[in-house]
Image (cartoon, rainbow, N blue to C red):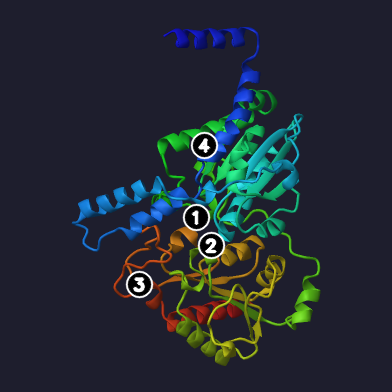
Amino acid sequence: MFGIGIMIRTVRYSKKHGMTATIKKAAGILGAPFRYFFLREDFLRDAHRAVDRCRPRDGRYHRLHALCNVAWNLLSLVRFYKSDRKRVKIDVYKAYGLSKPDPAKMNVGILMNGGLGDYVVAANYIWHFFRKYGNGSVPCSIDVFCEYAEKALDILFDGSFTNRAVAIKHSELYGNGIDRRYDLFIDMGRYPVVRHRNMGRINSLMPELVEYILLIERFEMKHPGLRHSPVMDAKANALCVLNCMLRIQQPDIDGFLGVGKSFDFSLLVSDMSEEYLAELGLKDKKFVAVVNDSDPRYGGVDNNKCWLTPYYEILLRRLKESFPEWVFVRIGGMNDIADGCFDLDLAAKTSLDEAKIILKHAHLLISSEGGLVHLRAAVHGGCSVVLFGPTDPAFYGYEGNINLRGDGCPCACEGIITKEWSRQCLNAHKKLCMRSLTPNTVYDAIMRYEEEECAKA
């Protein structure tokens, strides 16, 4: 009781003499090493995978499933994590070229998560955020952070609506309290999450931003845990589909920022596009870009989203017979489609900036649902033939694309049955959703599209 009394008196004294802000700042500085030590950025990811690995084939053995997970969690208490390794103390600001936020501006930090497609969608969200709040009486400075696919930062942010784009590990960002130096810091996953806010400065410099912050926090209270990916992806996707929203609109809660079903901002493409296409021999030619891979973190060509290699080969050979003037170009990462199906192989040979040129000027893009489909939509390229399987075309499909899905499985299984859906297929006939999407179906859809285009011309 005596100790509690001292604490109460200390708080009252600090408030009376205006020392509260100083104490909070000191607590933040002292607390940073403790947050850094106890942060385990890889624990939840491993826990999600353990739940799927321990799942019994017979769902009636629920107690066995529970015991397996209890054993795994007990072992995790003594397990050595990567984040437990001895850290070398560094000056984070100097190492990453950061400077302290300008006190004369409204400073906003946004952390992006996911793969290339998620980054493209996040960039569109940030552009809309800047359009609404960036041109007020008080300048708004936006810093963007990411941990993976840092090369994407160069092609997504040209400085027109952001201040800096920095690749940094999540543990170093949060562990060193960088998020607390901003007036508003948003962790951008499927939905924006407010990780830090200085309501005093926000209310004085940009009071109109308070309404949006409260909107985000009310959404989190109404849908607790919905931001956690991939655990809650299925529920989050279903919520959007019920509200007639696409993936591109998902971060825009209640349509507050006005994000549409297509990209309102356009990613800039290099001024040297014609020279690059001429160098490849593609200038003034009708060429088709083909992709058959995914993010290496989620299985690469073994991802359940990827169409079957024999199907690609059958489709491309038929298209070459029907359209001998077309040039077929392989882009993206490495895959095992026969080399004879392509006239030009650029797999793993282009930068993302060069890939933007290819995607912008290609007559068609044939690809499974993935990052390059989103990137083509962002550069306002032409039609994409998108081959869906575990993911839902009603959620990921863009208007104007040829969005195809087979009828082998009754519904898209992304995150519904297993959180490792991209690698594990619980159907006895593996990848039945992709197997049921036959080359004839895709070929016929392309032929119908070409006939419609010829009729328009």
Q: Which residue is mark 3?
A: 407
Q: Which residue is mark 2?
A: 398
Helix, strand or loop at label 2? It is loop
Whole-percent x and y of residue 342? 61, 86
Residue type (three-letter) at the residue carrying disc 2: Tyr
Query: In whole angstroms, how far apart are the C-alphas of marks 4 and 2?
Result: 26 Å
Q: Position of residue 165 (x, y in %)?
A: 70, 49
Q: Does 208 sit above or below residue 420?
A: above
* Foreground label between 3 and 4: 4
- The x and y percentages for residue 29 are 63, 29
Name the residue beneath numbered marker 4.
Answer: 216
Which comes sooner in the sequence, label 4 or label 2?
4
Q: Amino acid at mark 4?
A: Ile
Q: Position of residue 214 (x, y in %)?
A: 53, 31
The kind of residue tagged 1 is Leu
Please report the residue visible at 26 percent of the width from the left and 50 percent of the height from the top: 66
Callouts 2 and 1 close, C-beta under 8 Å: yes
Mark 3 crowd level (few <14, some 14–19, many ≥20, 10 Å Cα): some
Instruction: Inspect this view and state whether residue 10 appears.
Output: yes
Alpha carbon of mark 1 to alpha carbon of mark 4: how far? 19 Å
The single residue placed furthest to the left in the displayed view is: 60
Q: Amino acid at mark 3?
A: Asp
Left or right, residue 438 beside residue 185 = left
Quadrant location, the N terminus: top left
Which residue sits at x=59%, y=34%? 32
Counting residues from the N terminus, which is met first, the one under dot 1 or under dot 4? Answer: 4
Q: CA distance from mark 3 to mark 1?
A: 21 Å
